[in-house]
Amino acid sequence: MATVSIEPLTKQAFAPFGEVIETDGVTPLSINQGYASRFNDLASIDVAAEGGQTNISWFVASLRPVPIAIRLMERHPLGSQLFMPLGGADWLVVVCSDPRNAATYRAFRATGQQGVNYARNCWHHPLLVLKDASPFLVVDRKGKGDNLEEYWLDEPMQLDLKPDRHEA
Ligand SMILES: NC(=O)N[C@@H](O)C(=O)O
Ligand code: NI
C-alpha cells in the first residue's frame, strides 16, 4: 500500500492547492480605536459560478480508524471550500493534482491555528481530524449545479501518521 508522508502546512507548500489562513507573517490593521487587530483579506471565496452563493457551516468531525486510509478524493468544480478549526487541535489536509497518480498526493499537518481554503476544483480528502469531535467553521458554496466530483482509489493509500500523533 502506498503511503503519503505528512509535512508541515505552509503557505508556500500549499500554494498550488489554495490558501492557508493564519496570522503568522501577517501584519494586522489596528481597528476599533486600537482595541482590535484585523488580519485582513486572508482568503478569496470563489462561489459565484452558476449563481452560487456563500454557505457558512459548522462541522464537527470525528476521528477515523488508524492507520488512516485514503480511499476517496473529491473536488468542487463550482466553488472554493474553506475550513477553519475552532477547537485548537491539529488536523490533516490531503490534496493531489491527479487522484489517479499516487506521486501527486501531498499530506500536511495543520495546527489548530491554521485553516485552509481549497481552491475551486482542488482535489482534496474530506475533512480529516486528529482529535474527536473537532469543530470547524466552513465557508463554501450553495446553489444549483453539481458541485461534487468524487474519485474512489483502486488501491487505498495510507497516511504515514506516527502512532503517537493523535491528540489526547
Ligand atoms: N461534504 C462536505 O460538505 N464536505 C466535504 O466537501 C469536505 O471536504 O469535507
Ligand atoms: Ni470538500
Image (cartoon, rainbow, N blue to C red):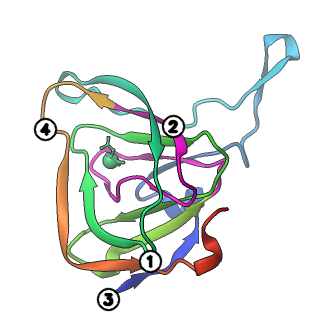
Closer to viewer: mark 4 or mark 1 = 1
Residue at the image point whose x is 73% and y is 48% from the top: 25
Q: Mark 4 or mark 3: which comes first in sequence? A: 3
- What type is the residue that disc 2 sits on? Ala
Give the percent coordinates (x, y) of residue 13. Answer: 53, 64
Give the percent coordinates (x, y) of residue 155. Answer: 22, 81
Q: Mark 2 or mark 1: which comes first in sequence? A: 2
Quick one: 91 or 96, which is closer to the camera? 91
Q: Which residue is mark 1?
A: 67
Q: Which residue is mark 3?
A: 1
77 inside magenta stretch: no
The span from disc 4 to disc 3 (Cα, nearest Å) is: 32 Å
- What type is the residue that disc 1 sits on? Pro
In the image, residue 81 above or below residue 65: above
The span from disc 4 to disc 1 (Cα, nearest Å) is: 32 Å
Image position of 144 (left or right of 132): left
Image position of 118 (left or right of 111): left
125 inside magenta stretch: yes
Q: Which residue is mark 2?
A: 43
Q: What span is in magenta?
A: 111-140
Q: Which residue is mark 4?
A: 146
Dot 1, crowdedness within 10 Å: few (<14), some or many (≥20)? few
Q: Mark 3 or mark 2: which comes first in sequence? A: 3
In the image, residue 68 above or below residue 74: below
Disc 2 element: loop
Please tell me in which quarter of the rendered image ligand 1 is found: top left
Image position of 123 (left or right of 45): left
Dot 2, crowdedness within 10 Å: few (<14), some or many (≥20)? some
